[in-house]
Image (spheres, rainbow, N blue to C red):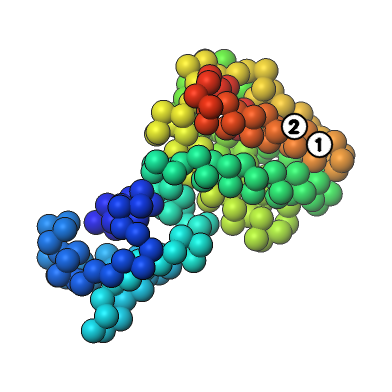
């Protein structure tokens, strides 16, 4: 129920400022009053609506939503406005991940460094085998370890955001027919730079990955073929 309403909101079917009564929600989505009330409470927690007695349920502007919520990201990526979400995610990653890689190179212990290398190798193997499920799993794991290894708790929580992006590209058919093995090899460069404690090199390697990813997004938005680099 929450997902159905959220998709309608992200698609602009319910516009900012629009007010619905709980009865309207029940009728529109064919659910009981209890289900409608609980769904509204969840949506309020994500800051996408407000609910007030004798006023009703008011749709809030997207600028006030919890845009870091993985479910909100999923709704936006599934909507006709996915282009804006893809660009915002690319820009967010470009602002954070190179610095996270530099911090990881300075602070990560041997165990973390070995884990990064293992995920990078798994990513490369999955790309060569055309294993999309394995690819997404390894890519998500790599970037979660990278962000966590930075030692910055706020960076670490962005792993949920990147994982949602990777899963959405798979589920919404945003993966190319052939995975680019040369591009994914750059993840191994990142892992090796972090393992060696080379901060500048680690940051530069991540920056290269993200620049390729951003170019992919732009090609995707233009309707051209894109190669996944994670």
Q: Residue at x 53, y 27 (%)?
A: 222
Quarter of image, res 18: bottom left
Q: Which disc number belongs to residue 208?
A: 2
Q: Is residue 174 above or below residue 71?
A: above
Q: Categorize mark 1 by other alpha carbons within 10 Å: few (<14), some (14-19), many (20+).
A: some
How many dots with numbers?
2
> Closer to the camera, 133 or 30?
30
Q: Which disc number belongs to residue 123?
A: none
**Residue 117: image location, x then y, percent:** 70, 32
> Closer to the camera, 78 or 97?
78
| Quarter containing the C terminus | top right
What residue is shown with label 1? 204
**Residue 49: image location, x then y, percent:** 36, 68
**Can residue 175 be seen in the rendering of this structure?**
yes
Q: Residue at x 26, y 84 (%)?
A: 53
Task: Please give left or right for residue 12 compared with residue 61 in the image.
Answer: left
Q: Alpha-carbon distance for marks 1 and 2?
A: 6 Å
Q: Is residue 209 above or below residue 79?
A: above
**Residue 183: image location, x then y, percent:** 67, 22
Task: Please give left or right for residue 212 compared with residue 72 in the image.
Answer: right
Quarter of image, res 26: bottom left
| Quarter containing the N terminus | bottom left
**Can residue 190 be seen in the rendering of this structure?**
no
State the SS at label 2: helix
Tag 1 near tag 2, CB within 8 Å: yes
Q: Residue at x 36, y 48 (%)?
A: 11
State the SS at label 1: helix
Task: Please give left or right for residue 163 compared with residue 195 in the image.
Answer: left
Task: Please give left or right for residue 32 compared with residue 109 in the image.
Answer: left
């Amino acid at each position: 129920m929450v997902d159905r309403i959220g998709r309608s909101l992200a698609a602009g079917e319910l516009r900012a400022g629009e007010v619905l009564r709980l009865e309207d929600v029940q009728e529109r989505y064919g659910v009981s009053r209890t289900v409608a009330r609980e769904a509204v409470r969840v949506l309020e927690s994500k800051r996408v609506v407000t609910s007030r007695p004798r006023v009703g349920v008011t749709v809030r502007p997207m600028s006030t939503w919890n845009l870091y919520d993985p479910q909100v990201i999923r709704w936006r990526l599934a909507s006709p406005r996915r282009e804006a979400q893809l660009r915002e995610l690319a820009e967010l990653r470009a602002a954070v991940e190179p610095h996270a890689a530099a911090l990881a190179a300075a602070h990560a212990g041997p165990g973390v460094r070995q884990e990064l290398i293992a995920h990078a190798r798994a990513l490369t193997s999955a790309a060569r085998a055309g294993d999309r499920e394995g690819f997404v799993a390894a890519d998500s794991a790599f970037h979660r370890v990278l962000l966590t290894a930075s030692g910055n708790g706020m960076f670490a929580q962005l792993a949920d955001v990147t994982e949602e992006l990777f899963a959405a590209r798979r589920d919404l058919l945003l993966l190319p027919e052939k995975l680019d093995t040369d591009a994914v090899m750059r993840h191994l460069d990142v892992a090796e730079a972090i393992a060696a404690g080379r901060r500048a090199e680690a940051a530069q390697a991540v920056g290269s990955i993200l620049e390729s990813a951003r170019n992919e997004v732009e090609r995707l938005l233009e309707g051209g073929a894109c190669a996944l680099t994670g």
